[in-house]
Amino acid sequence: MPINDDVIGLLMDMIRHNTVNPPGNEEPLALLVATRLHNYEIPCEVIKFGDRRASFIGVLKGSGLRPALLYNGHLDTVPPGEVAWERDPFVPVIEGDRLYGRGAADMKSGLAAMVVAAGILARSGVKLRGDLIICGTAGEEVDGAGAQDLIARGYLRNVGQIVIGEPSDLKLFTAHKGAFWVEITTFGKTAHGSMPDLGNNAIRQMNALMNRLANLKFPVNDHPLLGGPTMNIGTIQGGVKTNVVPDRCTITVDFRSVPGMDHGMIFDTLKNLLDRLSVEIPGFAAQMRVINDKTHVETPVNSPLVQAAIRTGQSVLETLLRPQGVNYYTDASVFVPALNVPVILFGPGNEKLAHQPNEYVEIPKLLKAVDFYVELAKEVLA
């Protein structure tokens, strides 16, 4: 089968599998990709960790003289959303040079390119000095459950460096922000809406808190690749009826951190703010809990992996890849603290199309990604 048809066909098959998370349902897709790897004569194991939840690991064996190189991508996607798509998000369509479908950019295209690249290497007979591991993880879009499961079971102990095929539009990302999400609830006292003075309005309490959050500053310098930290209030829920004083209001807040910024600093700053408000505002009461904690990641430019990627960019893409940063976080936030290894992000999808309706990948970039992954593996392992 021509390589173009191989990777395009695989990606289209992957898009047809609905892996919206929650609930995920990644197991059928993991089995599909495992079958493809077996067809390439690359041993592959599907690792279940819940109802219809699974990751996979394929290993193209090397001599063991060097640590393994991990090619990673996630199997799940976010929901299509409420905005109407111009086409069924789970029926892949090619229009011109674009292949449309949920996950086309984020990030089934990157994973498909990695799988096919491994197949090319396997069939070429090239001698690798270390294992090339192809890994598809479940659950990245919600909690990184698949990556955490693989780490806990010790599947990745011999990994020495990692490439994640997240959407980068064929740019080289060597750093990404961390994520620290909290849920904060303010508490009041219910009363009839016509007699609000008899109650304590939890939404008004929350409004006071949100005004303070909007002006929150952290003592950290901007990062040269990532800029500064950000804060977004993502959801708010409060009240049960128009004519009832609300006794509870809850928000979730998404902080994106940069290197040099400890997540404990964010937690302590928020706790101090809640303590101050409880003194300043009569009847103010609030609780906070952490709902997501993923570290920021940065690989030095002089890392051998980064330098190998730059050389590969010159030979395959005929361009000088300059290390850049990106605001989203990835499974690298799970892998790097556990394994203490360098990581880069490089994929054919456009990061600006991630989580968007009418998501697509440009087919020429998909094909270039296959070539890049083949040559990068040779640079690192051969």
Image (cartoon, helix red, strand yellow):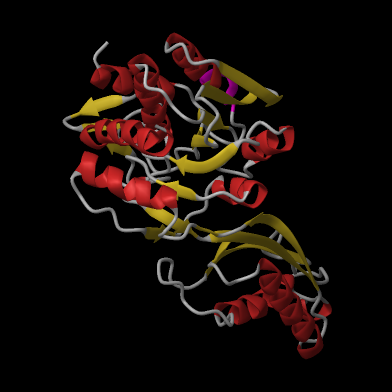
At which x and y percent is residue 245?
Answer: 75, 69
**Is residue 237 something that shows in the picture?**
no
Residue range in magenta is 25-29
229 vs 167: above or below: below
Q: As drawn, which residue projects farthest toward the front?
A: 65
Residue 135: percent from left, percent from top: 53, 30
- Identified at 57% across, 25% down, the residue is 57
Taken as a whole, is the magenta stretch helix, strand or loop? helix
Query: Nearest the camera: 126 or 2?
Result: 126
* Location of residue 364 in the rendering, given as x and y in whole percent from the top left corner: 21, 34
Left/right of residue 231 with respect to residue 9 in the rendered view: right
Tell me the quadrant of the picture where the C terminus can be found: top left
Please give the name of the residue rendered at 66% of the width and 54% of the height, measured from the top-left corner: 292
Q: Nearer the viewer, residue 381 or 7?
A: 381
Residue 16 found in image quarter: top left
Viewer-nearest residue: 348 or 214: 348
Tell me if I can see residue 93 in this picture: yes
Residue 233, compared with residue 337, is above or below; it is: below
- Image coordinates of residue 257 in percent, x first then y, are 56, 66
Reply yes or no: does residue 26 show up in magenta: yes
Q: How many marks?
A: 0
Q: Quadrant of the N terminus?
A: top left
Please report the residue visible at 49 percent of the width from the left and 36 percent of the height from the top: 69
- On the image, which quarter does residue 87 sit in? top left
Quarter of image, res 128 = top left
